[in-house]
Image (cartoon, rainbow, N blue to C red):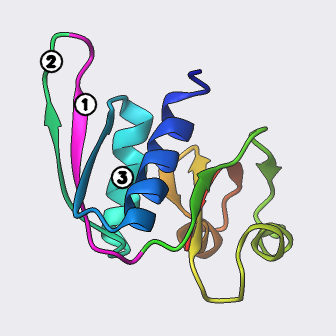
Amino acid sequence: MKQSILSDCMSTLKNAENVGKDRCTAESSKVVMEVLKTIQKKGYIGEFEKIEDNRGGKFRIELMGKINDCNSIRPRFSVKKNEFEKWEKRYLPAKGMGFLIVSTSQGIMTHEEAKSQEIGGKLIAYVY
């Protein structure tokens, strides 16, 4: 059963990493594309490309074997600029290990970037 496209993408990434695959495919959306760009910038996945299939498209994602766990966060909790530590403790295994992905007024970014820019937003996913 479909939950959300982002949740399905994160589950696909995690499951493919767990069985040792070197690539996977996930459904396409603008949010998924921005999340994948963020994960790629941090070095957890390799290149990804959009494949058109006349149904909205898919992403082919190269895996690097670095993801231990990733998931989308539901419901989308609002976070103020000084509350990130509370959510890091809840979703990440240790300080400095992994990152939260936050949707802000400046776009989708990691919680570290949001802290440095002193802006809050909505939590959408985590990766470590």
Q: Amino acid at mark 2?
A: Asp
Q: Is residue 124 visible?
A: yes
**Residue 40 x %, y %:** 31, 65
Q: Is residue 123 visible?
A: no
Q: Amino acid at mark 3?
A: Leu
As measured in the structure, the alpha-carbon distance from the residue carrying label 2 to the one carrying label 1 is: 7 Å
Drawn side of residue 34 relative to residue 103, left or right: left
Q: Residue at x 39, y 78 (%)?
A: 66
Where is mark 2, residue-wise? 53
Q: Earlier in the sequence, mark 2 or mark 1?
A: 2
Disc 1 crowd rating (10 Å Cα; few below 14, some 14-19, many 20+) is some
Q: Nearer the viewer, residue 97 or 1?
A: 1
Disc 2 crowd rating (10 Å Cα; few below 14, some 14-19, many 20+) is few
Q: Secondary structure at mark 3?
A: helix
Q: Residue at x 44, y 42 (%)?
A: 9
Query: Quick check: 83 above or below 98?
Result: above
As measured in the structure, the alpha-carbon distance from the residue carrying label 3 to the one carrying label 1 is: 12 Å
Which numbered marker is on residue 58? 1
Q: Amino acid at mark 1?
A: Lys
What are the residue bounds of the magenta stretch?
55-66
Q: Looking at the rendering, which quadrant does residue 65 occupy?
A: bottom left
Q: Looking at the rendering, which quadrant does residue 46 occupy?
A: bottom left
Where is mark 3, residue-wise? 36
Q: Nearer the viewer, residue 68 or 118?
A: 68
